[in-house]
Image: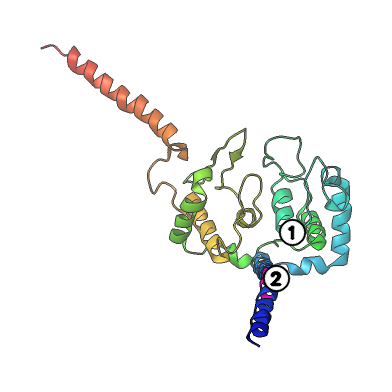
Amino acid sequence: MQRKKTTRTRATRKTAARRAPFATAALLGLGLLATGGAYTGIDAAISTPTAHAATIDDASKVAEGKALFNANCATCHGMDAVGTENGPSLIGVGAASVDFQVGTGRMPMQSQSPQAPKKPVQFTDEQIDQMAAYVASLAPGPAIPDEQYLQADGDAAHGAELFRINCAMCHNVAAAGGALTQGKFAPELQTVEPVHLYEAMITGPQNMPVFNDANLTPQDKADIITAIRWQTEVSDGVAGYGLGSIGPVSEGLFVWVFGIGGAIAMAIWITSRPS
C-alpha cells in the first residue's frame, strides 16, 4: 500500500514538472500581452490631441485636400501618402505635421538636402487646412493645438527653465539657433509663430525629438512659448547688448578686439610718455 502511494506521488510530481514550463510560458505570454496592451492604450491616450478633431469629419474638405495632395505631394510621398523612396509615409503624422511643414514653407521641398529650410509659403491657409484634414483622415495623429496654449500668457520663468533643459543645447539659450552635424542646423525660434512652435514640439520635424504630453504637458509647452516670446519681444536689452546672441564666438571676438586691443593701446600709450 505504501509502495502504491509512493508511486502515485512520484507520478504526480512528474506531471507537475512537465506542466510547469508550459504554465510559466503561458503566464509570461499573458503578462507581456497585458503590458503591451496597457502601453498601447496609454500611448494612444497621451498622443491623442484635444483640438481640431472636427476637421476630419468634413468630407468635402478631405476631398479637396486629397486633390491638392495628389497634385503637389504625391511625387515624393506617394499616392495615398504611403511613401516612396523619395519621401516618407505620412500615415499617422496628423494634421499638426502638415500644418507645420506646409505652413512654414518647408514643404514642398525645392531639392533634396540634409534639411528642409524655411521658405515662403506656397499655399493659402484654406489649402493647408484642407491638406491637413486629408492626412488626418488617414490615421490618428497629433492635431493642430488649441488656441488656449498659444497665447504666450503662461509662466515665462518656468518655460525658460524647461527651454534651457530641453531645447537650448540645439537652439541656443537665446533661441537664436545653432549649427548641427552634417550640414544640419537648429533654426532660430525668435520669429516663429506660436502655433508652429507647439506643432514642432509634438511632431518632431527634421532632427528634433518629439515631446509628447508625457515629456512636456500642454501647459509646459505653453510656458516655453511664453518664455520665447518674452525673451524676444519683452526683454529686449534687459541683459545688455546680446552681440547677436550666438554665444562665446561673438563674445570672445569682442574680448580679443576691444579688450586685448585696448590693453595693448594703453601699454603703448604708457611707454610712449616721456619720463
- Image quadrant where residue 47 sits: bottom right
Q: Is residue 227 above or below residue 75?
A: below
Q: Looking at the image, can residue 30 be seen?
A: no
* Prevailing SS of the magenta stretch: helix
Residue pushed farthest left?
275
**Residue situated in front as seen by the camera: 131 or 7:** 7
Residue 268: image x %, image y %? 23, 16
- Does residue 245 appear to the left or right of 258 in the view shown? right
Q: Which mark is residue 95?
A: 1
Q: How is the image coloured?
A: rainbow
Residue 203: image x %, image y %? 66, 54
**Residue situated in front as seen by the camera: 182 or 6:** 6
**Residue situated in front as seen by the camera: 47 or 251:** 47
Residue drawn at x 51%, y 61% as measured from the top left: 223
Residue 272: image x %, image y %? 19, 12
Spatial CA distance of label 1 from label 2 is: 54 Å
Q: Helix or strand or loop: what does disc 1 sit on?
A: helix
Quick one: quadrant of the C terminus?
top left
Residue drawn at x 56%, y 65% as measured from the top left: 217
**Residue situated in front as seen by the camera: 90 or 195:** 90
**Was residue 177 drawn as part of the magenta stretch in this picture?**
no
Disc 2: which residue: 18
Residue drawn at x 46%, y 55% as measured from the top left: 160
Q: Amino acid at mark 1?
A: Ala
**Was residue 22 drawn as part of the magenta stretch in this picture?**
yes
- Does residue 163 appear to the left or right of 117 in the view shown? left
Range of residues picked out in magenta: 16-23
Local crowd size for mark 2, using a 10 Å CA cut-off: few (<14), some (14–19), many (≥20): few
Q: Amino acid at mark 2?
A: Arg
